[in-house]
Image (cartoon, coloured by chain):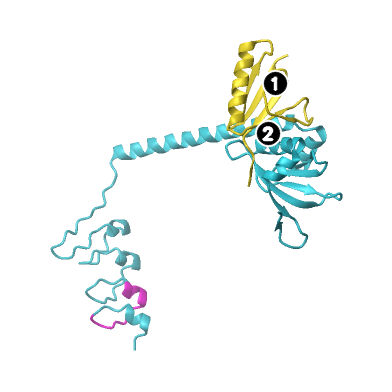
Chain colours: A yellow, B cyan
Amino acid sequence: MSGELCVMDHTGDTKSIWNPDNPDEVSAARSTFDSLKSKGYLAYTVEESGKRGSLIHSFDPRAGKIIMSPPMAGG
Amino acid sequence: MATWWYSWNSSGTTATTCVEWECWNTSGTTATSNVSGVWLKWNSNKATATNSATCWEGWVYQCGGSGGASVATFTKPTAEEIEARKRREESEAAERKKREAEQKAADEKAAALLRDNLTKEQADALDKHKTFAVIGSDGERYEIDVTKRQHNVFLTDEQGNRVREFCIHNGYKTPMADSHLAQKLLLEADAEHFKRVANKWDLVPARKAVRAG
């Protein structure tokens, strides 16, 4: 089953998909993940619609869906 | 005797009986009781009061007086300039329309992502009240108001009253619904992190909000 990386941005969000059994796709997704994490993005794995997400700090190729948000700041 | 204001408006040579506003607009050489309009007089060439130029044209006349260059500097745009301005305005309108369409699409996409990550109860509350409740990882109940990006998260008590206000968001580059989803996810995953980052205010009934420590 494919994994999906959903990154919040000015278009709403940009999704990229990877096949956990394809090393190139995993590598590309990991690279995106790591790059955004280095900029302070928060990453969550979400299992099912509405279920609570879990914060993750490293890329998990077996995660079904990862949502990444720009850094949070006090307003 | 002229009043202070009245005198202040008089011509330098004589006290005049013309009204203050009209005096203020008279030519520099004479007090006049001529009845050219105040605006027209204000725009007059200094040498002569004219009643033939339009206000706009009068306004751009140089106040040269005799020997001076009292040539109208107002020039009407050429047909080419008018056309160029029309093209520029059309292009700007098209660009604006494109940006609005992109923003609308982004807002809809973000709203769909948020809804996709809500329970049925949360989605129903969102539709009905424009807020939805979240149980934080600290066990507390929070409300997220989706009509605002900031000052929109509230800790509620057992009766459902809002007792503390939080302001925290993920910036302005994403649509508002993305920020609401980010608030929900962080509250549920790590409420302590949420509370550390957010600015907070205690909501005291019948009094001003007091900033919390």
**B12 or B41, nearer to the observer:** B12
**Identity of the residue drawn at 75% across and 43% down:** B131
Residue ID for mark 1: A60
> Where does residue B171 sit, x and y in percent of width and height?
60, 40
> Where does residue B20 sit, x and y in percent of width and height?
36, 77
Return the chain for callout 2.
B
Secondary element at image label 1: loop
Quadrant location, the C terminus of chain B: bottom right
Residue A12 visible in this rendered orientation of the protein: no
Please, which residue is most extreme toward the bottom here? B1
Task: Tell me the distance, in whole angstroms, between the alpha carbons under discs 2 and 1.
Answer: 26 Å
Quadrant location, the N terminus of chain B: bottom left
The magenta stretch is B13-24
Residue B201 visible in this rendered orientation of the protein: yes
B17 part of magenta stretch:
yes
Query: Tag 1: residue type?
Result: Asp
Vertical arrangement, residue A60 with respect to residue B48, above or below? above
Query: Tag 2: residue type?
Result: Ala
Residue ID for mark 2: B111
Mark sitting on residue B39: none
> Where does residue A57 sit, x and y in percent of width and height?
68, 28
